[in-house]
Image (cartoon, grey):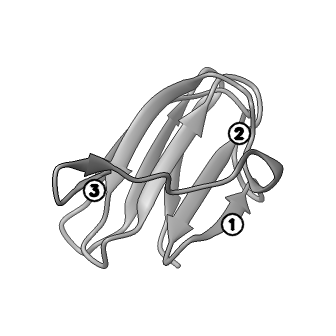
Amino acid sequence: VLRDGMVQRLAEPQDFSRSPVLSLLQDRLGALWVGTRDAGLFRVLDGKVEPVREGLPDLKVNALALGSQGEVWVGTDAGLARWDG
């Protein structure tokens, strides 16, 4: 994130996956959603990293989209999932 002309780190390696990032999305609350190649989905909010893997058809997250009601659509190699909190 760029703040005051400087790059700011949002997550530390120990809390986050080293798997390559394939997709990013910022939701209405300002959370950053990070889809990875083989570690699933992560939600970053207020410096806290939360893995979101339950219900995912596959851990490779290719695409993320924000729905009209604030839900997050997650596209994987094995299908589509919807996260509504």
Classify 55 as above or below 70.
Answer: above
Quarter of the rendering containing residue 67: bottom left
Classify 43 as above or below 63.
Answer: below
Question: Which residue is at the far right?
Answer: 14
Position of 64 compared to 12: left or right?
A: left
Do residues under tags 2 and 3 come within 8 Å of each other at their CB atoms?
Answer: no
Upstream in sequence: badge 1 or badge 2: 1
Secondary structure beneath label 2: loop
Secondary structure beneath label 3: strand
Q: CA distance from mark 1 to mark 2?
A: 18 Å
Secondary structure beneath label 1: strand
Q: Is residue 54 visible?
A: yes
How many C-alpha atoms fall within 10 Å of the one at disc 3: few (<14), some, or many (≥20)? some
Q: CA distance from mark 2 to mark 3?
A: 18 Å
* Three-letter code, disc 1: Glu
* Three-letter code, disc 2: Pro
What residue is shown with label 1? 50
What residue is shown with label 3? 66
Q: Residue at x 63, y 22 (%)?
A: 20
Quarter of the rendering containing residue 39: top right
